[in-house]
Image (tube, rainbow, N blue to C red):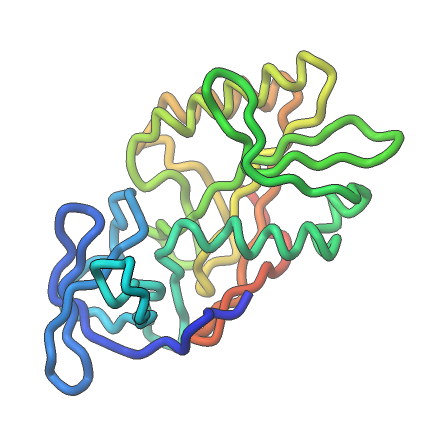
């Protein structure tokens, strides 16, 4: 998935009110960008960080820049826009590039299910049980090469695990897919110390038959693509 508009580099001044970030462009101008990430962004919102913004000229948008990437030492990147994984994964699912889900021929996003919820993707194919796929963006890393989820307490995430387990009880297939939006990690684990309730719900959902997949991503200022499976530890 390529970014529709070429990204431009900037320096983070501060992030505030969760969805706003003041940034300094290379010409010295300070602008306010939209931050499409409701999480804590632990380790990703320190003043002075080199970031990448997507400009826009949409008259319907109040802010003319969107924060898309953080650049790390060694040429590594983290994608901070939580809407990107769904777009990138949809392209991968439709091209049947996710091996564990490649037998499904029909991909429908945002289908209602559970209690006032929408599944990220409902997959179907002749002769197979419907597959409910929930996607989570993973951006936290507190140890070298180890990605963690979540970066803050997520009651919504716990609710999704419970609802996926219910789908399994009804005879469907259910998958929680963690997409690591970092290029410096090759292992994954749950941050049980941050949200023990989520970790417990994950264990219960797994015991009920909910599967989990973890994939990394290939990230650059040009775009983001689904990469390869990642080991869970």
Query: Image point 65% across, 39% down: which residue?
Result: 108
Task: Answer with left or right where residue 34 lies relative to residue 108.
Answer: left
Q: In terms of image quadrants, where is residue 168? A: top right
Query: Image point 59% across, 52% down: which residue?
Result: 89
Task: Answer with left or right where residue 82 lies relative to residue 210.
Answer: left
Q: Is residue 9 above or below residue 118?
A: below
Query: Image point 46% across, 70% down: which residue?
Result: 4
Q: Residue furthest right?
A: 127
Residue 86: percent from the left, percent from the top? 52, 49
Q: Is residue 46 above or below residue 19?
A: below
Q: In terms of image quadrants, where is residue 39? A: top left
Residue 186: percent from the left, percent from the top? 52, 57
Q: Residue furthest front?
A: 59
Q: Is residue 203 above or below residue 82?
A: above
Query: Image point 15% across, 87% down: which residue?
Result: 27
Residue 1: percent from the left, percent from the top? 55, 65
Give the number of marks: 0
Q: Is residue 111 above or below residue 21?
A: above
Task: Answer with left or right where residue 138 lies relative to residue 86.
Answer: left
Please tell me which residue lies in front, 176 or 96: 96
Residue 173: percent from the left, percent from the top? 70, 26
Please tell me which residue lies in front, 222 or 194: 222
């Amino acid at each position: 998935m390529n970014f529709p508009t070429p990204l431009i580099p900037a320096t983070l001044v501060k992030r505030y009110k969760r969805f706003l970030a003041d940034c300094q462009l290379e010409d010295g101008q300070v602008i306010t960008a939209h931050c499409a990430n409701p999480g804590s962004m632990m380790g990703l919102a320190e003043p002075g960080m080199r970031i990448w913004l997507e400009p826009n000229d949409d008259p319907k948008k109040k802010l003319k820049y969107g924060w898309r990437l953080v650049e790390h030492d060694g040429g590594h990147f983290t994608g901070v826009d939580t809407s990107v994984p769904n777009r990138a994964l949809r392209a991968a699912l439709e091209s049947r590039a996710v091996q564990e889900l490649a037998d499904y021929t029909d991909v429908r996003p945002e289908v209602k299910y559970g209690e006032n919820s929408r599944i990220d993707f409902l997959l179907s194919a002749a002769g197979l049980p419907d597959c409910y796929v929930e996607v989570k963006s993973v951006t936290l890393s507190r140890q070298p090469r180890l990605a963690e989820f979540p970066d803050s307490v997520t009651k919504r995430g716990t609710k999704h695990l419970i609802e996926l387990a219910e789908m399994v009880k009804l005879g469907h297939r259910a998958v929680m897919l963690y997409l690591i939006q970092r290029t410096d990690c090759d292992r994954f684990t749950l941050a049980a110390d941050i949200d023990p309730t989520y970790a417990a719900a994950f264990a219960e959902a797994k015991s009920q038959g909910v599967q989990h997949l973890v994939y990394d991503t290939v990230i650059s200022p040009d775009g983001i693509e689904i990469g390869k499976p990642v080991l869970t530890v």
